[in-house]
């Protein structure tokens, strides 16, 4: 029996492509349009990522696609009405990113509170010999407001609890099994928080939810940490709040425009910036390759 073709709808790590190639023929994104129509028509399964989504012009080339496996968490780059109309089911690997993303959030809380990046620079630059680094903020005993208490938010809350941080959370519906207090009003949550941590999905429902009113409530001693999506923040308001001292600082792994975030962020001393790497660990890469190939094989009926 000939090996089935599997379409890749965007860039994918080599390790994933190699593992999928063990039982199928990967067709990379730039090669899809060049395939003969009968081969394109035989493709039932595709692989993409939360970042690349599923562009309609690519889906048009694959009329019999029934399943897309997406690497990562987040569905804000998928049009579910379009997928439904085409009869395509989407599954993801979101369960694999939770631990790494939560770890990143905890690191960002600690790093922004203790000014880790500038502490490192203080030593490297030689300034240590003639200037004290100065006092920074303790994390233990403070309050973190976790916004979104799903797979990622829960792990952030658990791990910060282990560091002696008090937790309050905000979601649209309270989670009865969560041991932390729920706050139904986001501004109230911000006012109660020393660290406000975003762990909600992107999309229309959360667009710009961290606005000036929320940042004002967080206040001049408060820090904002984002490991979810850049779209959840009103970046104009955030830049103004950081510039004017409305909040103490921010640690951001995600931005509205990736990979070219608003350049004003890089001019601000009270912001820590990372290039959307919360889940980018070697450990995740290995798990991702195994999980995607398992999902693709199951979909193709190859056990
Ligand atoms: O609101 P609820 O009760 O559905 O709780 C969900 C919460 N959430 C929201 N909270 C406040 N306002 C909203 N408009 C809103 N929309 C959703 O976010 C739930 O507690 C949490 C999402 O949980 P999961 O679906 O398990 O997502 P996960 O795996 O924790 O990832 C969150 C996001 C990803 O979608 C990526 O964008 C990023 O973090 O890596």
Image (cartoon, rainbow, N blue to C red):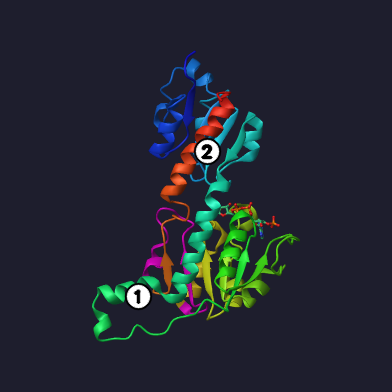
What range is drawn magenta here?
Answer: 244-268
User: Which of 53/167 is in front?
Assistant: 167
- The answer to if 285 sits in the magenta stretch is no
| Quadrant position of the C terminus in the picture | top right
Give the prevailing secondary structure in the magenta stretch: loop
Q: Is residue 195 visible?
A: yes
**How many numbered callouts?**
2
Badge 2 or badge 1: first in the primary sequence:
1
x then y, percent, for residue 39: 48, 18
Which mark is on residue 255?
none
x then y, percent, for residue 34: 41, 23
269 left or right of 171 in image: left
User: Which of 185/82 is in front?
Assistant: 185
x then y, percent, for residue 59: 53, 30
x then y, percent, for residue 160: 56, 68
Quadrant housing residue 31 = top left
Q: Which residue corresponds to mark 2?
A: 291
Alpha carbon of mark 2 to alpha carbon of mark 1: how far?
A: 39 Å
212 left or right of 280 in image: right
The residue located at (52%, 46%) in the rendering is 72
Q: Which residue corresponds to mark 1?
A: 119
Q: Does 267 sit above or below residue 95?
A: below
């Amino acid at each position: 029996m000939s090996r089935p073709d599997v379409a890749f709808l965007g860039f994918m790590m080599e390790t994933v492509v190699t593992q999928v190639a063990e039982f199928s023929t990967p067709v990379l994104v730039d090669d899809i349009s060049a395939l003969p129509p009968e081969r394109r028509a035989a493709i039932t399964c595709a692989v993409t990522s939360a970042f690349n989504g599923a562009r309609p012009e690519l889906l048009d080339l694959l009329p019999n696609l029934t399943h897309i496996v997406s690497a990562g968490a987040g569905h804000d780059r998928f049009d579910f009405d379009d997928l439904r109309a085409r009869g395509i089911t989407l599954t993801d690997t979101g369960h694999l990113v939770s631990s790494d993303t939560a770890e990143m959030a905890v690191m960002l809380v600690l790093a922004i509170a203790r000014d880790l990046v500038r502490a490192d620079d203080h030593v490297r630059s030689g300034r240590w010999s003639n200037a004290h680094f100065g006092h920074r903020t303790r994390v233990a005993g403070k309050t973190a407001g976790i916004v979104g208490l799903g797979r990622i938010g829960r792990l952030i809350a658990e791990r910060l609890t282990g560091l002696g941080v008090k937790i309050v959370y905000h979601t649209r519906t309270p989670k009865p099994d969560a041991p932390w207090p729920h706050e139904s009003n986001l501004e109230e949550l911000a006012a109660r928080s020393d660290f406000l941590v975003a762990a909600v999905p992107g999309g229309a429902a959360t667009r710009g939810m961290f606005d000036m009113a929320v940042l004002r409530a967080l206040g001049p001693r408060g820090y904002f940490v984002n490991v979810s999506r850049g779209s959840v923040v009103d970046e104009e308001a955030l830049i103004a709040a950081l510039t004017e001292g409305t909040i103490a600082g921010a640690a951001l792994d995600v931005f509205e425009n990736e990979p070219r975030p608003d350049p004003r962020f890089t001019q601000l001393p009270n912001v820590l910036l990372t290039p959307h790497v919360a889940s980018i660990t070697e450990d995740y890469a290995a798990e991702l390759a195994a999980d995607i190939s398992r999902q693709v094989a199951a979909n193709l009926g190859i056990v």
